[in-house]
Amino acid sequence: GPEAEATHKALRERLDSNKDGQIDETERAALRDLRKAAAGNKVEPYLLMAIIHQESHFYPEAVSATGVRGLMQMTSTTLEHLGVKNPDDQAEVVAAGARYLADLRQGYADMGYGPEDAQMLGLAAFNVGQGHVSDAIELVREEGGPRPGWRDVRQALPLLTRPDIAAATKYGLCRGYEAVDFVDKVRYFAFAIKGLVLGPRADGAQDEKLAGLGLALTRP
C-alpha cells in the first residue's frame, strides 16, 4: 500500500545517504546476534529488526514512560519470566524477545489461527500483553462461534481504552490503539526492510545491507 511504499522510499534514501558510513565490528556483532536470534526462533530477521526499530530505534538504553527498557522494550517482569539473567546484555535480550514472539505466535497457531493471523496477534500481544489481546478476542467473538481473526481483533483493541467496556473484561483497561499502531508499523517496516535487502536492487550481500540499514536507521 501507499504507506509501505513511502516507508520503503524513505528507508532507501536513508540507506543511500549513509552508504559510505563505516560499519564497525560492534555493529556487525549486533547484526550477528540478531540473525542468530531470528534463526533460532524461526522469526524473520527483517521482522525482528522492524520490532527493534519501532520499540527503541536501536538505542539500548531506551526507557519508556511506563518503565520498559532496552532494545526490545520489555518489562522487568517479562525479562524475568523469559529467564534473562543480564538485562544489559543486548544479545541475551534480543534472543529472549525473539523467543517470546515465537512463543506468542505459536500459542495462537495452537488455537487454530493461520500463520498470518497468528503473526499479527503475536505482535499485538508482544506490545500490549496476551491478556488484553484475549479480552479483545472475546469482545468480538460470537457466543459459541469461532475465534475472530486479526482484522476483527484490530477493530476491538482500541475499545479497551473505554472504561465502560474494559470494566467487563478480565484484564481491564489498556492502550489498545497503541498495539494496533505497533502492529501496523512493524508490518510495514518489515516489508520495507525486506524489499531493500531482497528487492530488485539487492546484490546478494544481505548481511552488509542489513548492517547498512542499522547504520542508516540509528544515525540522523
Image (spheres, rainbow, N blue to C red):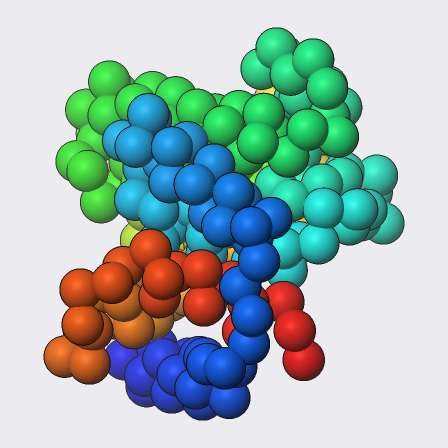
Compared to residue 187, the image places residue 33 above or below, namely above
Nearer to me, 102 or 125: 102
Q: Where is residue 11 drawn, in percent x and y? A: 44, 79
Compared to residue 1, the image places residue 134 above or below, namely above
Left or right: residue 183 versus residue 89 is: left
Residue at x-position 58% and y-position 15% = 82
Can you see residue 124? no
Left or right: residue 79 versus residue 139 is: right
Q: Quadrant of the N terminus?
A: bottom left
Residue 77 falls in image quadrant: top right
Residue at x-position 58% and y-position 25% = 92
Q: Where is residue 114 drawn, in percent x and y? A: 17, 36
Nearer to me, 150 or 199: 199
Nearer to me, 75 or 107: 75
Compared to residue 195, the image places residue 163 above or below, namely above
Residue at x-position 44% and y-position 60% = 211
Q: Where is residue 21 drawn, in percent x and y? A: 55, 76
